[in-house]
Image: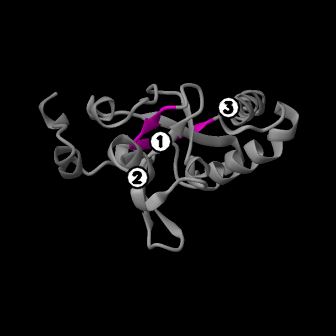
Amino acid sequence: MAESRLLRVLQLDASDARIFEPVAIPGEWAVPGSFHFLDADLEHLSGAERQAFTNGFLGIGSFGWTTLVTVAEIDPAERERVTRMLAGHLVDRFGAPDTETAMPAAREEIAFAQSLCSHPVGSVIAVTRSFDGQEFSEDYRRWNPPNEIDHTRLRIFGIDDTQA
């Protein structure tokens, strides 16, 4: 079932635009994007780059960052299209020799993102990454889909949907 799902950028407010440069576009497909930091000096990251490492998902179209994603349905043709788009970024930004060479890495990243999609469509997912001086770790958290959301949690995010 997760094979037919992928992560989409979710922005509940404008805070991502104040945190990340570049910022992801709401609704675009996303991946965790941890590969972005494989060669980074993690002990000396600062500002927006540090925030992207600590709490970011990578939008595939914009190659920008977001704090939250949601689980969404994706058809096989669209999944292939976004996988090729991601492979193109690997060529343009990370030095892969060509798209075909980059496709296995892009497929691996898409497959990992899909492994996070075993929850109901609409589930909200956040990540926390840390670095202990030797290696980094990731912790993913999930909130229920909107029809099951605890309204108290929404108010914590600054959204009061009880006054509709």
The location of residue 3, given as percent across then percent down, is 71, 47
In this rendering, which labeled residue sits more in front, label 1 or label 2?
2
Indicate the amino acid at tag 3.
Answer: His
Q: Residue at x 48, y 32 (%)?
A: 64
Residue that badge 1 annotates: 70
Magenta stretch bounds: 64-73
Which of the 4 image quadrants contains residue 54? Answer: bottom left
The location of residue 86, given as percent across then percent down, is 69, 34
Residue that badge 3 annotates: 89
**Answer yes or no: do the residues labelled 1 and 2 have beta carbons within 8 Å?**
no
Q: Residue at x 31, y 48 (%)?
A: 149
The location of residue 66, given as percent across then percent down, is 42, 38
Q: CA distance from mark 3 to mark 1?
A: 22 Å
From this viewpoint, is residue 134 visible? yes
> Of marks 3 and 1, which one's residue comes earlier in the chain?
1
The location of residue 13, given as percent across then percent down, is 27, 31
Indicate the amino acid at tag 1.
Answer: Thr
Quadrant the C terminus occupies:
top left
Q: CA distance from mark 1 to mark 2?
A: 27 Å
Numbered circle sitting on residue 45? 2
Q: Residues within 10 Å of mark 2 (few under 14, many from 20)?
A: some
Q: Residue furthest right?
A: 100
Q: Is residue 153 left or right of residue 95?
A: left
Which of the 4 image quadrants contains residue 106? Answer: top right
> Of marks 1 and 2, which one's residue comes earlier in the chain?
2
